[in-house]
Image (cartoon, rainbow, N blue to C red):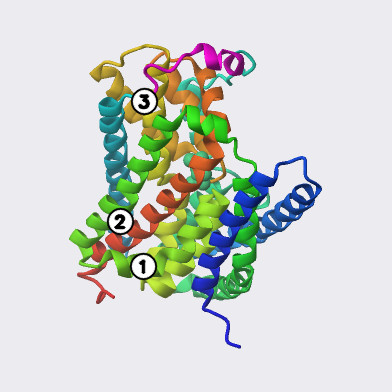
């Protein structure tokens, strides 16, 4: 019997995971079957993420260095670099504007009684995160001894060192050809390992979703229903309408073509809630299915996985408005503009790991004087919302790579 394609298997794995999770949810945690099954699901899911993380650092390092080294001309590097950053800022700005408009219109949180949440807030101590300290910490994190950065799996500083090394290889030219060829081969062999890891994706994704769905707190979801609806609605609007529209307007590519090529990465992001863990899959989808040239994808996708987070920026802005409504504070236009900028910084600074956006959200709340402890209210539903915002984050990276390829490469290389 022929097995369905990997793409279809991953989709089936996700569906079985959700259905299985609902089943164990209804069985209840007291049941022995639930206990054993969730233990197994947790183990398998974590092992799948471990495998992706194992390959992540060599992949990021080689793909960025080789990507830049192959751009060859310094002028071309400059154009890719500037277009990429401009696109990231633009798409995050669109996402946050959407969240602020929806938040102002639907006003989730107003009318909810804070007393219900007082217990959660009292028992939660928010970490202080003053903006200057956050920026200083972010900047210090950029430049690390590369060996330490590689060993500690510090993605951001690996990205920075790989960019510098890539530029040095371009400037050095033929002299460093051996290093470039060696890194190209390491990249090719790492991508081969990614193919092997992806064979396990259907089972890994199923296990992750079983665990996630089974342990959800349904009552809390009901209480925060309006907020959850606004967040999910705006994330879907951004991911299913605006990003594809931007893609279509710039490249002429249809959304259906994009989604069928991007599906593996979107489902993996949904199940792992980690842009970093998904990165190997994202890179494979971009180069294999979406025909992004490796030198563009190799640069845009790893950088995007660390700093381009449309879903997280959208969530942070929406959550700030929600908490303001909850505590009965009307944020002025000036305060909302502050939220806009700080949410962008906070999203860029959030590492691509589960619930990272929740930690950097403290920064957004503090910037307009909202009680940071209020994020305790959102913690129980965070993992669930993290699924969708991570998928939107990863979608933004893939759209970005296609847009950059179209805008930058059209005069230099024939486009796909
Ligand atoms: N989990 C998200 C990501 O990896 C970050 C976040 O919003 O928490 O992209």
**Secondary structure beneath label 3:** loop
Q: Which labelled disc corresponds to residue 78?
A: 2
Choose the circle earlier in sequence order: 3 or 2.
2
In which quadrant is the C terminus drawn?
A: bottom left
**Ligand 1 near label 1 (Cβ, under 8 Å)?**
no
The crowding category of the residue bearing disc 2, from other C-alpha atoms within 10 Å (few below 14, some 14 to 19, many at least 20), is few
Res 351 visible? no
Q: Which residue is mark 1?
A: 71
Circle 3 or circle 2, nearest the eye: 3
Compared to residue 153, the image places residue 112 above or below, namely above
Identify the residue at image location x=40%, y=47%: 308
**Secondary structure beneath label 2:** helix
Q: Rounded to the nearest whole Å, what is the CA distance between mark 2 and mark 1?
A: 10 Å
Q: Rounded to the nearest whole Å, what is the CA distance between mark 3 and mark 2?
A: 43 Å
Circle 1 or circle 3, nearest the eye: 3
Residue 199, quarter of the rendered image: bottom right
Relative depth, front residue between 122 and 218: 218
Q: Which labelled disc corresponds to residue 272?
A: none
Q: Rounded to the nearest whole Å, what is the CA distance between mark 1 and mark 3?
A: 47 Å
Res 327 visible? yes
Q: Which labelled disc corresponds to residue 108?
A: 3
In which quadrant is the N terminus drawn?
A: bottom right
Relative depth, front residue between 20 and 377: 20
The crowding category of the residue bearing disc 1, from other C-alpha atoms within 10 Å (few below 14, some 14 to 19, many at least 20), is many
Choose the circle earlier in sequence order: 1 or 3.
1
Compared to residue 58, the image places residue 101 above or below, namely above
Relative depth, front residue between 348 and 325: 325
Over which residues does the magenta segment extend?
108-121
């Amino acid at each position: 019997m022929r097995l369905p394609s990997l793409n279809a298997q991953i989709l089936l794995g996700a569906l079985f995971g959700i259905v299985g999770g609902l089943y164990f949810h209804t069985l209840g945690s007291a049941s022995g079957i639930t206990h054993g099954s969730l233990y197994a699901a947790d183990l398998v899911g974590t092992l799948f993420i471990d495998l992706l993380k194992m390959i992540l650092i060599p992949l990021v390092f080689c793909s960025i260095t080789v990507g830049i080294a192959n751009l060859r001309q310094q002028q071309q590097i400059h154009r890719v670099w500037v277009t990429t950053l401009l696109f990231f800022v633009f798409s995050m700005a669109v996402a946050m504007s959407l969240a602020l408009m929806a938040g102002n219109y639907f006003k989730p949180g107003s009318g909810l009684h804070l007393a219900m949440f007082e217990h959660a807030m009292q028992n939660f101590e928010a970490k202080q995160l003053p903006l200057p300290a956050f920026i200083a910490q972010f900047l210090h994190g950029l430049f690390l001894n590369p060996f330490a950065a590689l060993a500690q799996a510090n993605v951001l500083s690996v990205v920075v060192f790989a960019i510098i090394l890539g530029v040095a290889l371009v400037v050095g030219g033929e002299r460093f050809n051996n290093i470039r060829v060696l890194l190209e081969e390491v990249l090719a062999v790492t991508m081969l390992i990614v193919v092997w890891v992806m064979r396990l994706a259907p089972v890994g994704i199923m296990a992750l979703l079983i665990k996630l769905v089974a342990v959800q707190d349904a009552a809390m979801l009901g209480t925060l229903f309006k907020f959850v609806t606004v967040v999910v609605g705006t994330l879907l609007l951004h991911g299913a309408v605006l990003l594809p529209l931007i893609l279509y307007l710039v490249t002429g590519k249809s959304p259906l073509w994009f989604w069928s090529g991007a599906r593996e990465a979107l489902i993996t992001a949904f199940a792992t809630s980690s842009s970093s863990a998904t990165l190997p899959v994202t890179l494979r989808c971009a180069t294999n299915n979406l025909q992004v040239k490796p030198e563009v994808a190799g640069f845009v996708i790893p950088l995007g996985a660390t700093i381009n987070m449309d879903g997280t920026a959208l969530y942070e802005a929406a959550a700030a408005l929600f908490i303001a409504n909850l505590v009965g504070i009307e944020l002025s236009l000036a305060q909302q503009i502050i939220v806009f900028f700080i949410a962008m910084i906070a999203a860029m600074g959030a590492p691509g790991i589960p619930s990272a956006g929740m930690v950097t959200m403290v920064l957004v709340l503090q910037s307009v004087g909202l009680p940071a402890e209020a994020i305790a209210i959102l913690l129980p539903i965070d993992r669930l919302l993290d699924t969708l915002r991570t998928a939107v984050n990863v979608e933004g990276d893939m759209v970005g790579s296609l847009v950059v390829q179209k805008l930058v490469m059209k005069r230099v290389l024939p486009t796909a």
